Amino acid sequence: MHYSCKNRLKNKKNNKKKGKAFPPASTCEKNKNYPLYFAQFSASPFFIIILLQGSVEHNIKKFLTIQNMMPTYVKYIQIKTMKQPEKTRKIIHIDMDCFYAAVEIRDNPQLTGLPVAVGGLRGNRGVICAANYEARKYGIRSALPSALALQKCPHLKLISPDIKRYARESEKIHKVFQNFTDTVEPLSLDEAYLDLSNSPALQNPLFKGSATLVAAEIRKEIFKATGLTASAGIAPNKFLAKIASDWKKPDGQFTIDPAMIDTFIKDLPVEKIWGVGKVTAKKMHEMEILYCRDLQKISLKKLITLFGKFGYELYNFCRGIDNREIITSRERKSVSIERTFEEDLSSIENCLDEMPSLYEIFQKRYQNSVEQAPLSHGHETQRKSPFKLFVKIKFSDFTATTIESSFEKIEIDHFSSLLKQALERAPHIKENKVRLLGVGVKFHPDSFYKHSDPAQLDLFSSLASHS
């Protein structure tokens, strides 16, 4: 549970305490008299960020005490609370093995043992969605251009994606999950977190309270229902469970129990940390930060200075700490579609000519989203609140621009107007052609609906619609 507030301190009230120093983070961590989990100056000496343990109500009293400890030059305080788990959780991360490719091979056994990839077939613009392990030996990975994949492996069996078929298999998989726990967080068609902490399944004598045995049974049931293999990671939190599911792939599982976290995490490469991409990893390597044990030597203040807000996550993740809860429903923030053209569009008129087909596809996806996640009681009037429509353009030199504006209704004329404005203000249309167009709508943060169905990645849906 997170709670934050900003409080402007009155200088008059603190004049008597002028010059009083605030205890450093290390002191607060060790001294039980201070009600802090840790306290740390932000980049500005006039702004202090404090992280507390416990409930909001309990910490209001703490905040009043801390407020009187501040030196006079501090103008703003930000308080955040971190709710610590009451007991060790049992989280399972299930990840299907080469899901899309595996479905194709299962349905066409002649592909067994051959390099197989699922992806776009549209000339040089298609990309790979998924590849089996035989194809990965040739360096074929998701998001790799299909043309390049065929250069790497001329005998690659490239198959156009069938999202509807994959979705049907996904439904079978999620039904298996529900047999073991109701606390499921779907991440995509082929991936999900399960929280077994309070699951009745652990009371089954067959499992002896072991999430590891439950995970093995889930994988077995998935294979019975679909003929497909899955890998699993079992750990006390989401971060570690996801890492563990990749440890014994394919068709395996790995458990990180609480007793082994400290030893395991120290030797974990920084690339394995959630949120660390190629750019961040390169930056870390240049600083000789290769493993989590290297990150552990860096103070929170230094991590925030180096990596901004992500420094908080790094501080926790490199110690194997992750208090994120399983989210069984998500608020949908937007619905959009985009299309990469086989031949670039060379004029504003050509772009506008594509709008009717884009709008038709968008309408279908928008309507499907509404039908899948009906409004809750009392939200009917919120659906009529203004929408923010947006148009995305990517040029042949891979530069991109996005324009958005609020409208009361979703209409094709509004999208066309935004498209025209964006093209007229961008000099690229004269120098570079348009390779991609996208349209979408953003919802107000406090309106519309909650979405709890397994998510379909836009990349895959787009390929299915336009291959």
Image (tube, helix red, strand yellow):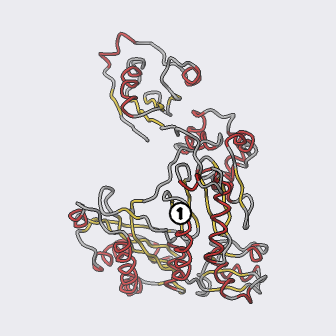
Residue extending furthest toward the front: 205
- State which quadrant residue 4 falls in: top left
Left or right, 461 with reference to 331: right
Dot 1 lies on which element? strand
The residue singled out by tag 1 in the image is 187
Position of residue 255 measured from the top left corner of the image (x, y, whole percent): 70, 52
Residue extending furthest toward the top: 16
Decide which of 68, 418 is in the foreground and name it: 68
Q: Quadrant of the C terminus?
A: bottom right
Q: Quadrant of the N terminus?
A: top left
Decide which of 452, 66 is in the foreground and name it: 452
Position of residue 208 measured from the top left corner of the image (x, y, whole percent): 65, 51
Whether residue 223 is visible = yes
Residue for point 72% across, 46% down = 286
Residue for point 41% across, 86% down = 350
Position of residue 49 measured from the top left corner of the image (x, y, whole percent): 46, 32
